[in-house]
Image (tube, rainbow, N blue to C red):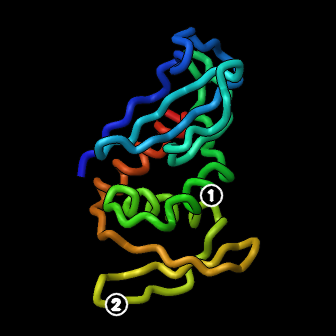
Amino acid sequence: MIYQIQGSSRQCARTGRALQPGEWIYSVLYERDGQWVREDISADAWTGPPEQAFSFWKTRVAPAAAAAKPALNLELLWDCFERSSASQEPRQIAFRYVLALLLMRRKRLRFEAIQRDEKGSWLVLREARTKQVHQVFDPQLSEDQTSEVQAEIESLLGTT
């Protein structure tokens, strides 16, 4: 499983204008032909979320040479986790699984149990705030595959 994602292009996908450090933009995540694609749109060109978008978020353009790696936005991680719940596509199942691991690391989700059925193993997780239970399929990723998906998530969310 190979995940290749482009980082921010630092160019508005609608106008072609160069995006400036510190400028507010909207980033949109799509899945196209089995690939994750990120588009950045300047605030002045934003007309709302595209219908075919998997997820979107508002962020600032990072300085060209950021001194420190910014932290992942917990609410954005959560939004992506919730939006991915219905997908049966293997790439999105892997994406959701790694999102769940990141959310457990940040204590937004708590491990409850592992359930097994004829399809495989499921993590049973409880949301810390609402106590809602979530089941996340374990796609049995290798350590390298998990790292690749995590790097993809960080790239998509603008933290690398």
The spot of residue 110 in percent (x, y) is: 61, 75
The spot of residue 69 in percent (x, y) is: 57, 34
Placement of 146 over or under 9, stated as above or below: below
Q: Residue furthest left?
A: 1
Badge 1: few (under 14), some or many (20 or more) residues near its Cα, within 10 Å?
some
SS for dot 2: strand
The spot of residue 59 in percent (x, y) is: 67, 32
Q: Quadrant of residue 36?
A: top left
Q: Residue at x 50, y 87 (%)?
A: 113
Residue type marked 1: Trp
Q: Residue furthest right?
A: 129
Residues under numbered marks 2 and 1 in contact, where contact means CB atoms less than 8 Å apart: no
Residue ID for mark 2: 117
The spot of residue 33 in percent (x, y) is: 29, 42
Q: CA distance from mark 2 to mark 1?
A: 26 Å
Residue ID for mark 1: 78
Placement of 50 over or under 2, stated as above or below: above
User: Residue 57 or 155: which is nearer the viewer?
Assistant: 57
In this rendering, position of residue 95 left or right of residue 66: left
User: Residue 11 or 112: which is nearer the viewer?
Assistant: 11
In this rendering, position of residue 97 left or right of residue 19: left
In this rendering, position of residue 118 left or right of residue 131: left
Placement of 120 over or under 157, stated as above or below: below
Q: Quadrant of residue 12?
A: top right
Badge 2 or badge 1: first in the primary sequence:
1
Residue type marked 2: Asp
Q: Residue at x 62, y 70 (%)?
A: 109
